[in-house]
Image (tube, rainbow, N blue to C red):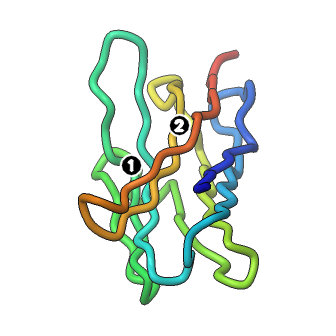
Amino acid sequence: QVQLVESGGGLVQPGGSLRLSCTASGIIFKIYTMHWYRQAPGKQRELVAGISSSGSANYADSVKGRFTISRDNAKNTAYLQMDDLKPEDTAAYYCNSWLNSMFNYWGQGTQVTVSS
């Protein structure tokens, strides 16, 4: 049984930082591309960042320079370091592991709220 468990969300003031974690089980983690998506109320889910099995990372323009995605294959965990958070970053954040269309898994989400 595949499980992706996110943690690290919460309430933070503008300009603050959070680090999200996504720990996977039931998959060969090191061969999967890992993504972080987010969905704000009334909006479509959007891709925030991704990191390939080789460690190559990409980011949405809206978070470049502020967010950093990483992975620790020994711990089966992907991370999203979020710095200089803005109110528009408020959303539910979801972890995704992707190998192909048949092997594509999601976590349950963790809420990030940026507010003073």
Q: Amino acid at mark 2?
A: Tyr
- Is 113 in front, or is 27? 27
Q: Amino acid at mark 1?
A: Val
What crowding class fits label 2: few (fewer than 14 Cα within 10 Å), some (14-19), or many (20 or more)? many
**Residue at 37% from the left image edge and 56% from the top image edge:** 104
Alpha carbon of mark 2 to alpha carbon of mark 1: how far? 9 Å
Do the numbered discs 2 and 1 sit on residues whose CB atoms are within 8 Å? Answer: yes
| 3 w.r.t. 34: above or below | above
Does dot 2 land on a helix, a strand or a loop? strand
**The furthest residue to the bottom:** 54
**Residue 17 placement: quadrant:** top right
**The furthest residue to the top:** 42
Does dot 1 land on a helix, a strand or a loop? strand
**Residue 114 placement: quadrant:** top right
| 93 w.r.t. 106: above or below | above
Where is residue 28? Give x, y as percent: 55, 78
Q: Quadrant of the C terminus?
A: top right
- Is 1 in front, or is 58? 1
**Residue at 62% from the left image edge and 65% from the top image edge:** 26
| 60 w.r.t. 73: above or below | above
Where is residue 76? Give x, y as percent: 68, 72
Q: Which residue is mark 2?
A: 93
**Residue at 33% from the left image edge and 45% from the top image edge:** 62
**Residue at 38% from the left image edge and 57% from the top image edge:** 64
Q: Is residue 85 left or right of residue 98?
A: right
What crowding class fits label 1: few (fewer than 14 Cα within 10 Å), some (14-19), or many (20 or more)? many
**Residue 8 placement: quadrant:** top right
Where is residue 27? Give x, y as percent: 56, 70
Q: Which residue is mark 1?
A: 48
**The furthest residue to the front:** 1
